[in-house]
C-alpha cells in the first residue's frame, strides 16, 4: 500500500515536473525565442546605470588660469617682442611642468646646484611674491629652518629648476605676503617633509582667510598704510584705532579715478590664454 | 654715520616706486649695502665668545674687501666683548643673486687668522655658494656646518 502510494507519488511528481517543464518551455518559447533550456525565474536586477561621459565638462569647467607673467606690461615696445618671448616660455613649459600657483601656496622646488651635495637642492616654502614678466618671471619662497628665516627668489624659466611641486594649493587675502617677514615665525614655518595635499583642477581656488599676528613694531615697511592695501594682518592687536586713522592720511583716493593709470588686460588675457592653450596642446 | 644711515632708510621708505599701475605690486627697497662698518651682526657658531651675553651687540669695524661692502664669503673684523676678532660672513639680509638664499639676519662665524673656525658647530643653515668662494679655503667652516640651503 505504502509502496504503491510512494510509486504513485513519484509518478505524480514526475508528471507535475513534466507539466511544469512543458509550461515553462511554452512560456519561455513564447517570450524569448532563443532560449530552449528551462531556467528558474531570475532575481530582479535593475538595469545598469548609464555611464555618462560628459566630454563638454573636461575643458570648459577647468579653471581658466593664465600665469601672470604672460600678460605683457604696458610699454612702448613692439608686441612682436612679447610674442617671441611667449613662444620661448611655451617651449620651456613643454619640458618642465609649471603648475598653477598663487601667493600663499606651499611649493617644493628642486634645482640643480653645482655646490650642493648630490648636485640637487630641494627647498620647500610658502610663496610670498610672484614678480617679473616674460622669461624673467620669479617667485619668492619663504621658510624658517633651524630658527633662521630663509627666502629664495627662483626664476620660473631658469634651466636650473628641475621640478616645481605644489604641496598645498590655496590663495590668501593678499597677492603679496612680504609682511610675513614681520609676522610671528609660526606663520612662515613650513614642514620640509610635508606630504602634498591633493587638490582639484575644476573647483574655485580655496582662499585662506587667516589674519596674521605681527611682531611688535617697528616693521620693515609700514604695512598699515593704504598703499599696501593689506587685508591679511590683525591690525587691532598691534595698532590703536588712532594709529590706523593716522595711517589713512597717506591714502590717495584719487588714484582709482585716474584714467591714465588704468590698464585693461581682460581682452589681452583672453587672446593670450587661447594662444597659450593652443600651443600647449600641440 | 648712524644718523645718515637712518635718514637714508627713511627716505627710501617714503619715496614712491616708479610708475606702478597696479597698486598691489610694490618695490621692497633693498638695503644699500650688505654688511659694512658698524653693522650689528649675529654670531651663529657655538663659540663662547659669540654666545656669552654682553651689553653691546657684536659690530663690524672693518671689512676686508676693496669696497667696504661685505657679502657672503668675505672676512670682516668684529668688535665683540671689548676684543677684536676676525669673522666670516655666512648670510646677509640683502637680496643677492636669484636662486641664492637670503637670510633674515646678518650671520657671521668667528674665525682665526688662518681661517680656522673658533666654534665647533654651526646650527644655522649655510648657503651652498659659500663653497665656491675663490682664494680662501673655508673647508673647515663647511665641515662644522650642519645643514645647507
Image: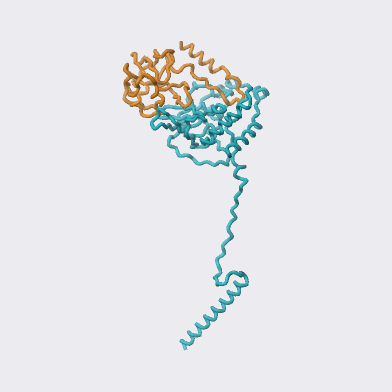
Note whether A175 is above or below B106 in the view shown: below
Number of residue marks: 0
Which residue is drawn at the image coordinates 36% and 29% (left, top)?
B146
On the picture, is A18 further left or further right than A110?
right
- Can the viewer see residue B104 in this picture? yes
Rendered hue of chain A is: cyan
> In the picture, which quadrant includes the C terminus of chain A?
top right
Q: Is residue B65 left or right of residue A208?
A: left
Displayed quadrant of residue A232: top right
Q: Position of residue B57 (x, y in %)?
A: 39, 17
Name of the residue lying farthest toward the bottom: A1
B84 is higher (above) or lower (below) than A75: above
Q: Is residue A213 visible?
A: no
Identify the coloring.
Answer: by chain
Task: Name above or below for residue B87 compared with residue A234.
Answer: above
User: Splitting the image into 4 quarters, where does residue A259 fall?
Assistant: top right
Among the chains, which one is orange?
A: B
- In the image, residue A184 above or below residue B135: below
Where is residue A257 drawn, in percent x and y?
A: 67, 24
User: Residue A116 is drawn in which quadrant?
Assistant: top left
Camera-side residue of A128 and A68: A68
**Which sits in the foreground, A240 or A68?**
A68
Q: Nearer the viewer, residue A237 or A200?
A: A200
Q: Residue A178, percent across and down?
A: 51, 26
Amino acid at each position: 500500500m505504502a509502496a504503491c502510494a510512494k510509486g504513485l507519488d513519484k509518478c505524480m511528481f514526475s508528471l507535475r515536473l513534466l507539466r511544469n517543464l512543458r509550461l515553462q518551455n511554452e512560456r519561455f518559447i513564447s517570450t524569448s525565442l532563443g532560449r530552449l533550456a528551462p531556467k528558474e525565474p531570475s532575481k530582479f536586477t535593475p538595469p545598469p546605470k548609464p555611464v555618462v561621459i560628459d566630454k563638454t565638462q573636461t575643458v570648459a569647467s577647468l579653471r581658466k588660469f593664465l600665469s601672470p607673467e604672460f600678460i605683457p606690461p604696458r610699454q612702448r615696445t613692439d608686441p612682436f617682442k612679447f610674442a617671441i618671448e611667449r613662444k620661448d616660455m611655451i617651449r620651456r613649459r613643454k619640458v618642465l611642468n609649471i603648475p598653477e600657483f598663487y601667493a600663499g601656496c606651499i611649493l617644493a622646488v628642486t634645482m640643480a646646484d653645482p655646490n650642493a651635495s648630490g648636485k640637487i637642492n630641494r627647498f620647500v616654502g610658502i610663496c610670498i611674491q610672484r614678480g617679473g614678466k616674460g622669461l624673467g618671471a620669479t617667485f619668492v619662497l619663504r621658510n624658517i629652518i633651524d630658527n633662521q628665516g630663509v627666502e629664495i627668489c627662483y626664476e620660473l624659466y631658469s634651466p636650473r629648476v628641475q621640478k616645481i611641486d605644489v604641496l598645498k594649493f590655496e590663495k590668501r587675502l593678499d597677492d603679496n605676503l612680504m609682511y610675513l617677514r614681520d609676522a610671528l615665525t609660526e606663520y612662515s614655518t613650513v614642514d620640509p617633509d610635508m606630504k602634498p595635499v591633493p587638490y582639484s583642477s575644476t573647483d574655485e581656488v580655496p582662499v585662506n582667510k587667516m589674519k596674521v599676528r605681527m611682531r611688535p613694531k617697528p616693521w620693515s615697511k609700514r604695512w598699515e598704510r593704504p598703499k599696501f592695501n593689506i587685508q591679511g594682518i590683525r591690525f587691532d592687536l598691534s595698532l590703536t584705532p588712532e594709529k590706523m586713522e593716522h595711517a589713512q592720511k597717506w591714502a590717495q583716493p584719487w588714484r582709482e579715478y585716474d584714467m591714465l593709470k588704468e590698464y585693461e588686460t581682460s581682452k589681452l588675457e583672453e587672446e593670450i590664454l587661447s594662444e597659450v592653450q593652443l600651443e600647449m596642446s600641440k | 654715520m648712524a644718523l645718515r644711515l637712518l635718514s637714508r632708510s627713511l627716505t627710501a621708505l617714503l619715496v614712491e616706486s616708479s610708475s606702478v599701475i597696479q597698486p598691489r605690486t610694490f618695490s621692497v627697497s633693498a638695503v644699500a649695502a650688505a654688511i659694512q662698518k658698524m653693522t650689528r651682526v649675529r654670531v651663529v657658531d657655538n663659540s663662547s665668545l659669540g654666545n656669552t651675553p654682553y651689553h653691546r651687540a657684536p659690530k663690524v669695524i672693518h671689512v676686508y674687501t676693496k669696497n667696504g661692502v661685505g657679502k657672503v664669503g668675505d672676512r670682516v673684523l668684529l668688535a665683540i666683548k671689548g676684543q677684536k676678532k676676525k669673522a666670516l660672513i655666512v648670510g646677509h639680509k640683502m637680496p643677492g643673486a636669484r636662486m641664492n638664499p637670503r637670510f633674515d639676519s646678518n650671520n657671521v662665524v668667528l674665525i682665526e687668522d688662518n681661517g680656522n673656525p673658533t666654534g665647533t658647530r654651526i646650527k644655522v643653515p649655510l648657503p651652498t655658494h659659500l663653497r665656491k668662494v675663490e682664494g680662501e679655503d673655508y673647508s673647515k667652516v663647511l665641515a662644522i656646518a650642519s645643514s645647507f640651503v
